[in-house]
Image (cartoon, rainbow, N blue to C red):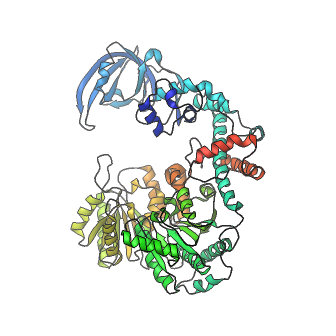
Amino acid sequence: MELQDKITTLKGVGPKKAEAFARLGVDTVEDLIFTFPRIYENRKQIVPIADLREGEDALFEGEVSLITTGGFYRKRGSRVLKMLITDDTGSIEVVFFNAAYLAKTIHMGDRLAFYGKPSFNRDHLQVIHPEFEKAETVQTGILPIYPLTSGITQREMRRLQKLISPLYGEVESILSDETVKRNNLCGMEYAIKNVHFPEERQSYNEAKYRLVFDEFMTLETGLMASKMREDDYEKGTRFEDDGCENAFIEALPYSLTNAQRRCVKEIMADLTSERPMNRLIQGDVGSGKTALAQIAMYKAVRSGYQAVMMAPTEILARQHYEGLKSDFAAYGINTGFLSGSMKASEKRQVLQGLEDGTIQVLIGTHAVIQPEVEFRNLGLVITDEQHRFGVSQRIKLKDKGDRANVLVMTATPIPRTLAVVLYGDMDVSVIDEMPPGRVPVITKRASGAAERERCYEFVERQIREGHQIYVVTPLIDESEAMDARSAKQVYEELSKRFRRTEMIHGGMKQAEKDEIMAGFSAGEIDVLVATVVIEVGINVPNATVMVIENAERFGLAQLHQLRGRVGRGKAQSYCFLIIEGQSELAEKRGEIMEKSSDGFYIAEEDLKLRGPGEIFGTRQHGLPDMRIADMVKHMNVLNAARDEAKALLEEDPHLLRPENQPLKRRVTKLFGEDLSLNL
């Protein structure tokens, strides 16, 4: 047995089981070694049944003194198997749903061990769906609890880890002896053994620190190598340093904020340098990112190059296109549009215009990165709402030109503590100032039927004053799995109450969505019931109220994005968060939303509440998933690993030295095709 052997070489792992492991990202024995426990359970002691406490997980054992099957549990819609388990001190009821088959393998008089959380049912103690096994084979001690998927049990995971534990010592260290010593790290074999099967807390802490350090070292080396790849280019697409953008800026119908002017200066310094620009513009909803993109595109065309902007949805792309086409036409700049829903004849015309250079600016969806799209002289690439694209998509678009300049924009504020990690391969500019005249949106929480009714009475008054309303729901259709109001349900209710009500959701055809949005923009629709399809990009200044049904189903960042759809005109705007049920997390989110309209503050608070994985979904950012490291909890380790990675790459930029080959292999495996690393 070797580290790179397929998981199917292990006893008990056949093709079907291998498919289940693949869902966990496990293909080889080494992958299984690096599948770390998420928590641990203390099963050192078997608790007498009489000493079991409600709500406290415990390990207990006893004899099966009674078995009953065939009852029907109406709420769960399943048949019930009940067992009475008895020891010398007392008895407890054990309940399983949809598990009548267990009656064939469990018999009266069997002695079994169980692990679960007891609770009171009327006058007796019971435990529902506990883990169990024969008493003579029960595992005791500090037991690891692994991430699972359908078809794999904790018992199997522990058995397989014991089986492959002799290979722990063969996992190569990615760190040099000097790095290990300098950072007071434990050895690799010790770390792996004590993270899977820790005997006491000190050894576990030492093990986890080492593995977290390794993971951050790999991440930061990959991100820095990607940035160095950009920096190593001798030449980029250099634009003319003639100040032509100044006249364009002065002709804008509004004045740039100081933050926008600072960002323009940073962008122009990039565009007129020898090195290709690779810059992120991060700004809150309504802070004026599109104006910066427009100035950069004007600069590109006046320097003899083409520019392209990619947006995540057709609605947003068309909105950009209509605005930019009108503005650029006054300067004789030809703007084109490209999306997957266009007719073949229209696409051919656009593709021809790009190839011969008659289309100088292109706005589009993912369609712009298709192989048949060829530019004559692409010099500037812009992606809007960067969190919707992976790094690989950005690179595909960039490769349409010869070392084109890259500008990416996001209205999803990233906490300052994480921006350097998530965008480690980019220079970052922040628009931390809103244009004058923007009136903050008043946000209020609501719960229960009476408060919901008051919200809609307020909506009625706003409609009478000539304003428009968004109502957002988490679902399109009603769901048995989720207790939440659907768009269709809310639409049926509101269309009876408000005459000009329409619905839009992601399951509709693009042409239908476009028609409804055009009607809403034109003021022909009073109430738009929607799913999160309207989260980004819709700009209707006359919309003054955002009602979010089942607000507890949304994260803070998403709530902030949705709220950003209103407050875009001169009238005071409002956001109502309708929260169902009692949830401490939902109430905390609502409190934060009421208190602040600062996207960066909200992102920091979201980070504290949920952690980075849930907020961002690392895949959205083109970053690999972290198996054991946490970017918030382990920030001190991250900083230490980042310093080591920086020093290492300064000495050995392409990791050519023999002692750095293990790290190079780990970086390549971790990032895969997400980043084109030049190592």
- Residue toward you, 231 or 410: 231
Would residue 111 be visible to someone looking at this image? yes
- Residue at point 46% right, 75% down? 336
Q: Which residue is drawn at 58% across and 71% down?
A: 380
Image point (32%, 28%), residue name: 96
Residue 566: percent from left, percent from top: 42, 71
Nearer the observer, 633 or 583: 633
Q: Quadrant of the N terminus?
A: top right
The correct choice, above or below, for 565 with respect to 37 in the image is: below
* Relative side of 493 to 383, left or right: left
The image shows residue 88 at horizontal and vertical percentages of 40, 13
Q: In percent of the image, x 52 and y 21: which residue is there? A: 140
Measured along the vertical axis of the image, is residue 373 above or below residue 16? below
Which picture quadrant has residue 153? top left
- In the rendered view, does 147 fall on the left or right side of 499? right
- Estimate the x, y position of residue 524 in percent, counting from the top left: 29, 77
The foreground one among 286 and 600 is 286
Q: Where is residue 238 in the image (x, y as percent from the top left)?
A: 67, 73
